[in-house]
């Protein structure tokens, strides 16, 4: 199989999971994947859920004696808005300057096609490859993987027999410097809903004695950080540890300083915690962020009111050692304690998942009981990436969250090998999303090396 041909065909399906009208395209994408996995040498099927189907491909499904790898990816994509900012049609793949442009090229159809092509190519050379592989490709990642945990639970016995999960829904540094992701921040989300009077009020007739919900919201939000940008919620940093020296050394290999990062973002200044640079803040520290604030009149001109309601949407990024439910309760308690008299507050929970971390072999604090297959996979990935890209990969945590990684860990006791494919300028979730073709092609060889290395070693969970 040719990776570029496969990805170009895959990208033509407008399977936007957030858009109910795109359901036919979602189904067509799933059917396409069933055909692609079958062509690659797997027995493939659609597994229906209460939402979008999960596509499952199995190679050597009946061989419990073989090393077993679960491959995860997702076939749904983000909406394309604003359409007018796309330089090319979002679902018509275009090659320009060594990059492939289309929605889903970097997140996650391009990366998700890599292991399928790798397995197909290996089976052409060795039709009896002594390896068991299970592909699980979901269609709801962009809307929170709402039903994928139910799929994992329903297939717990099959999936738990695997040695590890491998995926490429993470980021690398640049086209010459690949990264292996070893950690992800967790997340909690909540919405503050404040209510004051029973309706909007004329600000001239009632302004003054009535506490304005927008004012209350601004005061509450401002109180949640101090002058050094630390979160002021009591107990928020409980359990947060100091990163190992090797992690900081790996990050230093990137060679990016805070001035370069600020320039890349287009901001005049950064607000890092004392003792941490920007790259370290993103990977080693928790956050409390305001994702949206609203209330009162939002239209053109003036409308002189005391609004009845105001709201703020908040997410907290979590690091290992933090329990999502505990953090939610602490944040909610702090907010309630700062609501002024005359204002009623409702705090609505939203998304939630734990942080994830796996220490690669040979590093300080690495797990001496890591199973042989995952250890070999890490080593194979490092060797082939070094060979193909001319540099050893950087082992680093990512600032984002992928909830299903913790689902695999919590439900099936599986750790994950996460190989970065997209880049900081891949414009994920934005117009003109793109992926570097050379990275796709070289990572096919990386997956082939991982599969071959695991196939050469007998089944072992220890």
Image (cartoon, grey):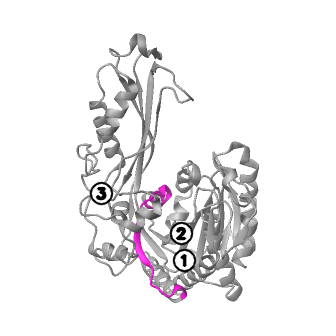
Q: Nearer the viewer, mark 3 or mark 1?
A: 1
Which quadrant of the view contains residue 138? bottom right
At x 31%, y 45%, the residue is 326
Q: Residue furthest top?
A: 205
SS label for mark 1: loop
| Whole-number angstrom distance, CA of label 1 to CA of label 2 | 7 Å
At x 26%, y 43%, the residue is 233
Which span is picked out in magenta?
388-409
| Whole-number angstrom distance, CA of label 3 to CA of label 1 | 33 Å
Mark 1 or mark 2: name the one nearer the start of the chain. Answer: 1
| Whole-number angstrom distance, CA of label 3 to CA of label 2 | 28 Å
SS label for mark 2: loop
Instruction: Tell me whether the residue at label 1 lies in contact with that at label 2, contact meaning CB atoms closer than 8 angstroms.
Output: yes
Q: Position of residue 395 (x, y in %)?
A: 40, 75
Q: Nearer the viewer, residue 230 or 125?
A: 230
Quarter containing the C terminus: bottom left
Residue 175 got which mark? 1
Residue 423 got which mark? 2
Q: Which residue is mark 3?
A: 321
């Amino acid at each position: 199989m040719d990776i570029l041909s496969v990805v170009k065909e895959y990208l033509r399906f407008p399977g936007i999971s957030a858009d109910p009208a795109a359901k036919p395209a979602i189904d067509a994408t799933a059917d396409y994947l069933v055909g692609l996995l079958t062509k690659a040498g797997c027995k493939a099927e659609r597994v229906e859920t209460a939402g979008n189907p999960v596509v499952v491909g199995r190679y050597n499904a009946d061989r419990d004696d073989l090393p077993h790898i679960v491959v995860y990816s997702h076939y749904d994509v983000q909406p394309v808005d604003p359409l007018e900012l796309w330089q090319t049609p979002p679902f018509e793949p275009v090659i320009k300057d060594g990059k492939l442009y289309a929605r889903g090229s970097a997140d996650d159809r391009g990366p998700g096609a890599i292991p399928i092509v790798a397995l197909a190519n290996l089976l052409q050379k060795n039709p009896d490859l002594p390896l068991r592989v299970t592909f699980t490709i979901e269609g709801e990642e962009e809307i929170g993987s709402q039903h994928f945990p139910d799929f994992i639970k329903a297939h717990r016995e099959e999936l738990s027999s695997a040695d590890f999960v491998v995926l490429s829904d993470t980021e690398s540094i640049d086209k010459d410097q690949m990264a292996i992701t070893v950690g992800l921040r967790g997340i909690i989300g909540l919405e503050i809903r404040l209510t004051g009077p029973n309706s909007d009020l004329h600000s001239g007739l009632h302004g003054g004695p009535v506490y304005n919900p927008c004012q209350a919201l601004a005061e509450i939000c401002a109180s949640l950080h101090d002058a050094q940008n630390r979160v002021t919620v009591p107990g928020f940093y409980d359990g947060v540890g100091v990163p190992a020296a090797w992690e900081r050394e790996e990050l230093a290999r990137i060679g990016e300083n805070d001035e370069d990062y600020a320039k890349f973002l287009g901001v005049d200044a950064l607000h890092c915690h004392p003792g941490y640079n920007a790259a370290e803040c993103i990977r080693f520290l928790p956050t409390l962020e305001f994702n949206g604030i609203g209330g009162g009149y939002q239209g053109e001109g003036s409308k002189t009111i005391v609004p009845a309601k105001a709201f703020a949407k908040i997410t907290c990024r979590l690091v290992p050692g933090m329990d999502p439910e505990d953090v939610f309760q602490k944040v909610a308690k702090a907010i309630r304690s700062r609501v002024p008299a005359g204002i009623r507050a409702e705090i609505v929970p939203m998304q939630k998942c734990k942080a994830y971390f796996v220490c690669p072999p040979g590093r300080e604090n690495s797990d001496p009981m890591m199973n042989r297959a995952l250890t070999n996979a890490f080593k194979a990935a490092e060797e082939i990436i070094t060979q193909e890209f001319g540099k050893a990969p950087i082992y680093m945590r990512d600032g984002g969250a992928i909830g299903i990684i913790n689902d695999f860990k919590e439900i099936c006791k599986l750790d994950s090998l996460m190989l970065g494919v997209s880049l900081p300028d891949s414009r994920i979730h934005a117009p003109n999303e793109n992926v570097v073709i050379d990275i796709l092609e070289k990572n096919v060889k990386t997956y082939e090396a991982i599969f071959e290395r695991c196939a050469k070693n007998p089944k072992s969970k220890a």
